[in-house]
Image (cartoon, rainbow, N blue to C red):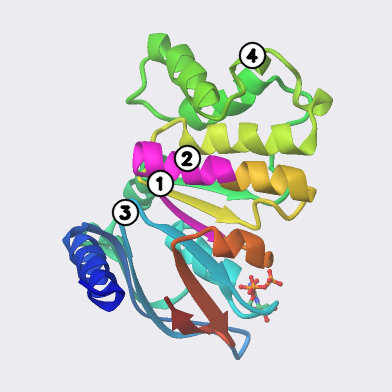
């Protein structure tokens, strides 16, 4: 058997595996116009379970605007967002909040942690408004999330005493404490040096592989994008390539 046949076989197997995967999020014909400027121009894209997706493109291409719609933070658009075939726009604000809290974890560049509070309290904030988590379960969920990001031993430490790389791990623990299906990250390594960038990317890969979490991240850093299995390039509010 020659190498071409082997590659073709591998390709077909990968394609079959991809086709079998469950679609968890669908964006259909998303258009966002603000103050007369088109920010997203007819964007349609599907995301599948266990995917690791990197979104890149020039500044102003619409990457953050797209993430905000995926994360149910922005309702000001036309088109449809379907999460597991449920049309998001038909849901009440309470139902949307539930999805934001349970299905999606969000990580940002500047960590968005409360510096004066401890690691425990910062991660606990996600669970505060979640009526489905009983008081006795809160601690074990927090410990489990910190364990996943390798930060269990810092549980009682104040955020202000931690390094940038450690803070981002805590922010990731806060985002995954509810075991979301989708972890969204907007420039998660933008404030980190190259060593910590590598470590945080390895953590995303580990969460993706070990817990089948779909990771969708935006980055300017092509090293980070190249670590993702699927790469989407945005340009002037539309998807230029998806491979
Ligand atoms: N609320 C808003 N009102 C008006 N214009 C906006 C708003 N939000 C974003 N924009 C504009 O929409 C375009 C896309 O912004 P967005 O932040 O999504 O781009 P981006 O690709 O994430 O850029 P960057 O890489 O610089 O973060 C930009 O031209 C921006 O100025």
Q: Badge 2: how crowded within 10 Å, few (<14), some, or many (20+)?
A: some
Q: Nearer the viewer, mark 3 or mark 4?
A: 4
Residue 101 figure quarter: top left
Element carrying mark 4: helix
* Residue hosting label 3: 92
Quarter of image, ligand 1: bottom right
* Residue hosting label 4: 153
Q: Is residue 16 left or right of residue 30?
A: left
Q: Which mark is residue 64?
A: none
| Labels 1 and 2 touching (C-beta < 8 A) | no
Calculate the distance from the C-alpha at mark 1 to the C-alpha at mark 3: 9 Å
Element carrying mark 3: loop
Check residue 211 for magenta coloring: yes
Q: Which mark is residue 97?
A: 1
Q: How many marks?
A: 4
Element carrying mark 2: helix
Residue 168 figure quarter: top right
- Dot placed on the residue nearer the N-terminal end, 3 or 4: 3
> In the depicted view, which residue is nearer to us: 36 or 227?
227
Calculate the distance from the C-alpha at mark 1 to the C-alpha at mark 4: 31 Å
State the extent of the magenta-drawn residues as a range: 202-217
Q: Which mark is residue 206?
A: 2
Q: Is residue 74 visible?
A: no
- Dot placed on the residue nearer the N-terminal end, 3 or 2: 3
Determine the residue positioned at 68% across, 64% down. Answer: 221
Determine the residue positioned at 20% across, 64% down. Answer: 13
Q: Is residue 129 visible?
A: yes
Q: Badge 3: how crowded within 10 Å, few (<14), some, or many (20+)?
A: few
| Labels 2 and 4 touching (C-beta < 8 A) | no
Residue 30 figure quarter: bottom left
């Amino acid at each position: 058997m020659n190498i071409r046949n082997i590659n073709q076989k591998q390709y077909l197997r990968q394609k079959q595996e991809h086709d079998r995967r469950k679609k968890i999020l669908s964006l259909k014909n998303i258009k966002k116009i603000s103050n007369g400027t088109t920010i997203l121009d007819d964007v349609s894209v599907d995301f599948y379970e266990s995917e690791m997706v990197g979104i890149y493109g020039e500044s102003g291409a619409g990457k953050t605007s797209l993430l905000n719609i995926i994360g149910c933070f922005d309702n000001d658009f036309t088109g449809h967002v379907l999460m597991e075939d449920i049309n998001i726009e038909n849901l009440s604000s309470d139902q949307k909040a539930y999805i934001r809290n349970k299905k999606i974890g969000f990580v940002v560049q500047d960590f968005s942690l409360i510096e004066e509070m401890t690691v425990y309290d910062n991660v606990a904030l996600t669970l505060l408004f979640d009526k489905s988590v009983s008081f006795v379960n809160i601690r074990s969920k927090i410990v489990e999330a910190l364990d996943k990001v390798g930060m269990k031993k810092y549980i009682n430490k104040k955020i202000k005493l931690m390094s940038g790389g450690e803070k981002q791990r805590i922010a990731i623990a806060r985002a995954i404490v509810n075991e979301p299906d989708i972890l969204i990250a907007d420039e998660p390594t933008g404030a980190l040096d190259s060593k910590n960038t590598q470590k945080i990317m390895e953590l995303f890969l580990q969460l993706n592989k070990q817990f089948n979490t779909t990771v969708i991240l935006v980055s300017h850093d092509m090293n980070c994008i190249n670590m993702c299995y699927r790469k989407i390039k945005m340009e002037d509010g539309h998807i230029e390539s998806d491979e």
